[in-house]
Image (spheres, coloured by chain):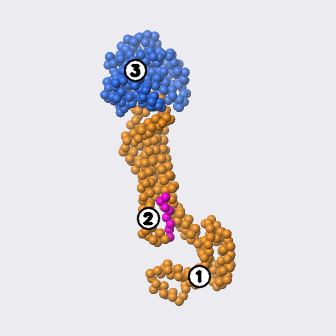
Amino acid sequence: MRPSTILYELRQGFRNIRRNWMFSVASVLTMTACIFLFGIFYSIVLNLTNIAEGMENKIPVTVYFDEGTTDEEIELIGSQIRERPDVESITYVSADEAWKQMEQEYFHGDEEAAKGFKDINPLADSSNYRVTSKTIETQDDLVKYIMSLDHVRQVNQARKAAKTVGDMNSVVYYASMIIIGILLLISIFLISNTVSVGISVRKEEIGIMKYIGATDRFVRAPFVLEGIILGAVGAAIPLTALYFIYNETVNTILSHYSAISDSVEFMTVDQVFRTLAPVGILLGIGIGLVGSFLTTRKHVRV
Amino acid sequence: MIDLIEVTKSYGKGLPALNKATVHIDKGEFVFVVGSSGSGKTTLIRLLLKELDPTSGSIVVGGERLEGMKRSRVAKYRRRLGVVFQDFRLLKDRNVYENVAFAQRVIGRPTRVIKRRVPEVLQEVGLADKYRSFPDELSGGEQQRVALARALVNRPDILLADEPTGNLDPRTSEEIMGLLEQINQRGTTVLVVTHNKDIVNAMRKRVVTMNEGVIVSDEKEGEYHEA
């Protein structure tokens, strides 16, 4: 196709949009809602996945010992664990340290309540090793190995906590997929409707084109371009809005809710948009292309 | 140039719109197809435009067999034809120049060719000074000239005219027929479907007469016979 023909087709595409501006606006708004929701769900799913992975990697495996295990035996267990190549780090936490940590976490601001335990350590048998594996994939093997060691009473795995986040992630993922799926169908329908209105308005012109010898591709191109333009605009608007909203939301959470910011690491807006931007734009263009292509196939038979 | 061999076109039950029509038209001929309403004239044009397929028989135009022609080929085939209608079929939102240029744009001619060719053809039909006018600002005769310019701008081998003077007064009709004759003299095969008796009788061209889908007569330098 010659550049002048491509320009002509593009002009016709914009002309179609101008002619049926009300339908065009409706299509863009629906598409905007669809991609906006997609972006929100995508950001949530991405962050939940990230949090779950972070939890799996960061929260160590805790190794507890049988009652009455001697310091030498504990030291032996430590050295056996340390020998493993898949161990990233290992830290010993004595029963006193464990209680001090708990005091700080649970009785902070209520020191009077902690005084009830002044002379006893409720965590007397809670000295432990905190072991971090190099990769989450090897954690199960490591746990199995530690469990097989003498004097090991219990091993607590971080996976359980991570699994809870993971399960939540799945629910959000499937719910968002259903909602996005429905919105996608509505968007395709609306774009298709807009394009078919454009076709009926230009019926006479299409008839003349046919007599003159226009190819199917030439007749269809402005309508397909119209769909693509509507799709691209319908994607660009929510993506731009999401960029600022995401940034603002994360900053607000981090500055106002220190409890969350201490335990959870959000992905940066650039990390999220590295995939969300191209996926969103492609989704918009794809919806526009499918909606308009199917309609022109049906109505513009040359 | 145009060969119809035993062509029948039926739209359903009842009499066929075209019934075993056989006609041969040579390159450069000027032919009138006449007959009353429903005689099959327009069906003939639509078959030649490959807008319809015959129920039976064979149509060959410029060496191309129309039955079984691939869809992708139809557009290329139509570029060899020029067509004008009784109702002009101009685009009301475009001026004279744009209406004619549209025919070139549609077949992918470059802009520099369009800029050269459109004024040429407007000159040929006598509308060089009205290129900026819109269809609604023109008389019926002028609108038909624009339609003719659009049909001719791609230099077709064959010009099909379906009742080109149907909406025009006698004087303007004569002017349009004069233009068609000039076009024919330059080598284009012209086929005019009409029921304008005066014009047919005045021009003394080949006349194919149809009645109820059947070709009832085919005369060189013929006259309009009422069926």
Determine which of the numbered discs, if any, sits on residue A94 in the image: 1
| Chain letter, blue in picture | B
Going by the numbered disc 2, the residue's amino acid type is: Asn
Q: Which comes sooner in the sequence, label 2 or label 1?
A: 1
Query: Which of B119/A46 is in front?
Result: B119
Say if A92 sits above or below B112 in the image.
Answer: below
Both labels 3 and 2 in a single chain: no
Q: Residue at x 50, y 15 (%)?
A: B26
Both labels 3 and 1 in a single chain: no
Query: Which of A229/A89 is in front?
Result: A89
Callout 1: few (<14), some (14-19), or many (20+) C-alpha neighbours within 10 Å? some
> Which stretch did the figure color magenta?
A263-270
Do we see residue B164 in this rendering? no
Query: Which of A137/B195 is in front?
Result: A137
Both labels 2 and 1 in a single chain: yes
Do we see residue A24 in this rendering? yes
Callout 2: few (<14), some (14-19), or many (20+) C-alpha neighbours within 10 Å? some
Determine which of the numbered discs, if any, sits on residue A251 in the image: 2
Q: Disc 3 designates what residue?
A: B124
Going by the numbered disc 1, the residue's amino acid type is: Ser
| The colour assigned to chain A within the rendered structure | orange
Q: Residue at x 42, y 58 (%)?
A: A244
Is disc 1 placed on a helix, strand or loop?
A: loop
Image location (x, y in percent) of residue B176:
37, 18
Is disc 2 placed on a helix, strand or loop?
A: helix
Say if A136 sits above or below A228 in the image.
Answer: below
Callout 3: few (<14), some (14-19), or many (20+) C-alpha neighbours within 10 Å? some
Instruction: Please tell me whether mark 2 or mark 1 is closer to you in this view.
Output: 2
